Amino acid sequence: MHAFLAHSPKLIAHSKKRKNSFKLSTISYELSAITLSAISYQLSAILQSDTQTKETTNSTANNMNRALRIVIAGGGTGGHLFPGIAIANEFVARNSETRIKFVSTGNPLEKAVLSKAGFDLHSIQVAGIKGRGIWNQIASVLKIPGAILAANGFLKNFSPDLIVGLGSYSAGPVVIGAWLRKIPIAIHEQNILPGITNRILARFADRIYISFENTRSRLNPVKVSWTGNPVRRELLEAADSSEDGAAHAGDRKRFTVLIIGGSQGAHQINMVMAEALDYLQGADRLHFVHQTGEADEKMVTEAYRSQSVSATAQAFFDNMADQYRQADLIICRAGATTVAEITALGKAAIFIPFPYAADDHQTLNAADLTGDGAAELIPEQELNAELLGAKINHYLDHPEALENMAARARRHGKPDAAKNIVDDCYRLLTA
């Protein structure tokens, strides 16, 4: 990993800061790991009789692409959820009789997105650990035994062939329950720096799929496969469209800038973009598509209207494939799923990482591209209206730089990630 950090003193400093953050998380990490191990071994004897029948059933290998029963555990944010949906769709594409169940805490985003995607959601009660203060961490750990028992009951009833963990804290009890029942386990890590949940669950997993090659050294190399981060099928189809923005910028009257701050929007980006309108040159050639989040929708809409700048500002876009396809330049956070989508589609982007993400992993995600000229990175503490306006003006007037960045980004893309993961899952189940 340090190879791509070496070009920048700021990123070297960031690496040192990240090491310090590991030290601060040691207590919660070890507390969680020890507790999970103790609970697991105590419950394994109770569940042994249940697993014997299941083990016999699973030992009879069937052909590849047979109908399966799959549990995909984890969610919470779009960054965890959308890769899971991409994997689920690939399983269903192989065999329409395959049954998929998602398991997570059941927040409104999960319910809305999974309902639209046509997948069932089973909710469990569990809370996060990291960054919540020592007493809240202890309280969260004390909830784990009940969550594991609840997950075990669900797994016993559904009788899945495979568990796929997505890395959020809600995946923990399900993966541990699967390990106790001797159900094959695969986990996927979206970010370049593994989160605390996957660092714990890696010891229980049969397969570990990673999005960035630099993640390999941080996990058991015997289990690891560098597949990339799965991207939703509808977005991949946009990559082949003849309406691609960057490729046809000269054929349209307006240069389209897509601004996305994650499923909840990004308040700081919203505020700076509203002020940056004062610094735009040739605004009559620009069109903005801005995902604001609910809280800032009215403010951002009014900012564009007052400056007479063409824009479509909404709290959330369901048709992201269309928005990506038409975009010439993307301004966004650097969550792993956003990075995967941008590289799979081959789009030019300015990343503004969320500075409070766990272990500042968004900066590391972005740095994997910026070191190769495949994107730009602006730390949020350096972001201001004049700078952002200048960047937009530059790419508006230099389409060749935009196309070069997009081409370099495409080289980092892994559009076959979901296919590669599902191929390997079938190999795991037929071994």
Image: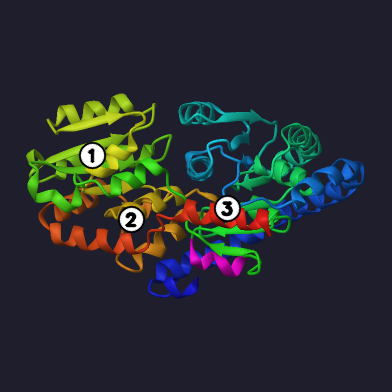
- Mark 3 vs mark 1: give the one in front: 3
Q: Secondary structure at mark 3?
A: strand
Residue that numbered label 1 is attached to: 275
Image coordinates for residue 3, horizontal then vertical, percent: 45, 75
In the rendering, at what x and y percent does residue 349 appear? 29, 53
Residue with the mark numbered 2: 378
Which one is earlier in the sequence, the residue at label 3 or at label 1?
Answer: 3
At label 1, the amino acid type is Glu
Answer few, some or many: residues within 10 Å of disc 2's Cα (few below 14, many 20 plus, some between 14 and 19): some
In this rendered view, identify the residue nearer to me: 428 or 366.
428
- Alpha carbon distance from label 3 to label 1: 39 Å
Magenta residue check for 186: no
Measuring from the top left, give residue 250's x and y in whole percent: 8, 50
How far apart are the two marked residues, 3 and 2, measured between alpha carbons? 28 Å
Query: Dot 1, crowdedness within 10 Å: few (<14), some or many (≥20)?
Result: some
The span picked out in magenta is 212-218
- Any magenta on residue 216? yes
Q: Residue at x 40, y 63 (%)?
A: 367
Reading the chain from its start, which is encountered first: label 1 or label 2? 1
Instruction: Label 1, secondary structure: give it.
Output: helix
At mark 2, the secondary structure is: loop
How far from the left and from the top, in percent, is residue 387? 23, 52
For the residue marked with disc 3, what is the amino acid? Answer: His
Name the residue beneath numbered marker 3: 188
- State the residue at coordinates (32%, 27%): 297
